[in-house]
Image (cartoon, rainbow, N blue to C red):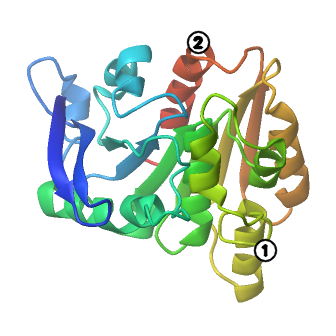
Amino acid sequence: MTLARLTFYSDVLRRDTHVNVIYPQVNERTPDELKDQIKPPYPVLYLLHGLSGNEDSFIRFTSLERYARDLPLVIVMPTTDRLFYVNNEAGYNYGDYITQELPALMADTFNIKQDRESTFIAGASMGGYGALNAAFKYPEKYGYVAGLSSLIDIQARYQMGPDPQSPADFHLLFGQESPAGTDKDITHLIDQAIQKGQKLPQVWLACGLQDGLISQNRAFKHQYQDQLTLQLIEAEGGHDWLFWDQYVQELLTWLPL
């Protein structure tokens, strides 16, 4: 397994940015029975950090490298600051970056599969929201989407108002407009996709019983369990890396590799 850190200029973000990539490698430590399975081109997982994180978070705070060591999977970990992986009112088009520019760059740089069923997106907390938003805004691009302790109800976040410690984040994300019924609203995106008869990605969610977002995850499952192939794991734990370290491993097991 190779861990690469890339620095490049993003035309969409109009600045330099970074991405970490875990890339499969067959070497003397690879079990013999797996060597024939770890061959390019590879499926790809875009893994999105939470509100206070960056592209290093999953590397620093979980054993992701170890969990992925013998998997035929490329894992791409970008960063987009604190603005939820969507296009925002200030013109910072993080959604376009995550769903269009970054995949194109990864396809040009690495030997990855580009079909829908081999393209996965996941994240923790804010990253879970970003993953779900991307997957249901572009269901033709993603076959599988997963979230760890996902913020799902963006309208609830809007109703909370600005964080006194970082009010600019709120205004950059929402401007003066409620997100309900817009492309920031995950349920709106799903309902639109269902009405259009689009094929929808399979969904895997995990959330701790002591996590304040458990009610949102339960409500989402209740609302869409008949329309989506959807699994929600509820287990002891909070909104923290102890929980995410355990369940990112479960997430990797769920993916069709």
Q: Amino acid at mark 2?
A: Leu
Q: Would you call the spot at circle 2 few (<14 residues within 10 Å), some (14-19), or many (20 or more)?
A: few
Can you give x and y, in whole percent of width and height, for residue 103 in the image? 31, 61
Q: Quadrant of residue 20?
A: top left
Residue at 81% from the left image edge and 17% from the top image edge: 210
Count the labels in the image: 2
Q: Is residue 40 visible?
A: no
Q: Secondary structure at mark 1?
A: helix
Q: Which residue is mark 1?
A: 191
Quadrant location of the N terminus?
Answer: top left
Q: Which residue is mark 2?
A: 242
Q: Secondary structure at mark 2?
A: helix
- The answer to which of 214 and 179 lies nearer the viewer is 179
Residue at 25% from the left image edge and 39% from the top image edge: 21
The CA distance from mark 2 to mark 1 is 34 Å
Please give left or right for residue 167 compared with residue 140 in the image. right
Q: Is residue 150 visible?
A: yes
Q: Would you call the spot at circle 1 few (<14 residues within 10 Å), some (14-19), or many (20 or more)?
A: some
Disc assigned to residue 26: none
- The answer to which of 2 and 211 lies nearer the viewer is 211
Q: Is residue 126 above or below residue 176?
A: above
Please give left or right for residue 67 compared with residue 191 in the image. left
Can you give x and y, in whole percent of width and height, for residue 152 in the image? 73, 48
Q: Quadrant of residue 180?
A: bottom right
Q: Is residue 175 above or below residue 213?
A: below
Residue at 51% from the left image edge and 28% from the top image edge: 52
Q: Sequence-wise, which precedes: disc 2 or disc 1?
A: 1
